[in-house]
Image (spheres, helix red, strand yellow):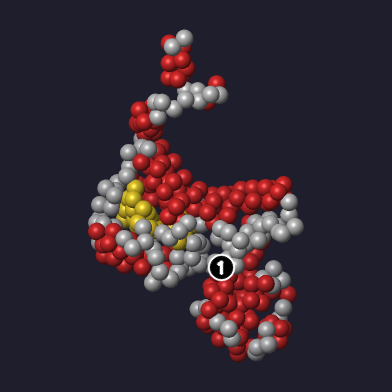
Amino acid sequence: MYIFQKIEELSIQYTDARKNIAEFLLNERSHVKNYSMQQIADLTFTSKPTLVRFSQNLGFTGWTELMKDFLSECHYQETHFSEIDPNMPFLQVDNADEIIHKICHLQIESLKDTAELMESATVEEAGHMLLSSRHIVVFGISPNNILGELFKRKMESIGHLVYIANMGESGMIANSLTEKDCAVLISYSGNNENREPMRYIKALKENNVKLVGITSGGNNYIRENIRCVLTISTHERLFTKISGFATEESINFILNILFAYCFSQNYMQNYNHKINNSIALEKNRRASINEMKEEIQYYDEQENK
């Protein structure tokens, strides 16, 4: 979890001085380097000692340490995304053409950022855990579990069964898995050990279940407890945004990479398995456009002439 997300949580949780400071930092993060500590204290109607306590609430020793890491984080955010705000990517005055362009640009940037954050060794480790497991279970709340359904369908097309742990059954499933199984935990913040899916990590680790985490950058509970973690492109706020356009694109991309890597490890067998199943299950499906017709459909049509 990045610092700006922790700050946003404080802005939601509290109504005292911490809210004033948090909202100031979130709203002025592109310019906060231009303010002195005293100026920020004056503008937030607080004091220097209050700013120090605010920093300590976030796990820093003081204001200087907080500002150093926060400014570094702001620089990363500004240099990896364009002028399009991932939280408010379009405005009320935008027409359909402008919305199309902005959402397209935002999602492309999210894909590029996710690819830069991805390490091949982590992808290989996660892929090997998936391929060596008896059961693969995806843990996450909506919409992450919905994205998991797409991953489930792809993996099943090459003979690997994947299950989605639904609300109300996740605890029972977590406790039933063993060292022969793999759990994929998806959480944008990944920070609250009492929320799903983080609350099941302890039981999964006690059962020696192989674990793959998919979460945001920065320190959080998932990163502290799971060795193999893939990083979501993290530019959206937790709460104050129109939708998770960039985040959903990033998670789906990560799951697609995992599927593609698993597919590649036994390429021709997986390809033949998928094609044979498609022919058997969808033999009555016909395309009307010549370019979309498969060879088997073409020959069937020729024989019927």
Q: Is residue 91 left or right of residue 9?
A: right
Label 1 Cα neighbours within 10 Å, binned few <14 / some 14-19 / many ≥20: few
Describe residue 71's horizontal placement relative to residue 125 as left or right. right
Whether residue 190 can be seen here: yes
Q: Position of residue 181 (x, y in %)?
A: 28, 52
Expressed as whole percent of the image width and height from the top left, the position of residue 6 reads: 53, 73
- Residue 153 placement: quadrant: top left
Residue where numbered disc 1 is placed:
239
Instruction: Determine whether 290 is above or below 108 in the image.
Output: above
Determine the residue positioned at 30% across, 64% down.
171
| Residue at the image point whose x is 43% and y is 16% from the top | 300
Left or right placement of residue 233 versus residue 274 in this view: right
The foreground one among 143 and 38 is 143
Evaluate whether residue 224 shows in this view: no
Residue at the spot 58% in from the left edge and 55% down from the top edge: 245
Residue that appears at 63% across and 81% down: 21
Report the label total: 1
Q: Where does the image place residue 75, in percent across and percent down from the top left?
A: 65, 64
Q: Quadrant of residue 303?
A: top left
Q: Position of residue 55 (x, y in %)?
A: 56, 81
Of 73 and 45, nearer the camera is: 45
> Amino acid type of disc 1?
Phe
Which quadrant of the structure image shows residue 239?
A: bottom right
Q: Secondary structure at mark 1?
A: loop
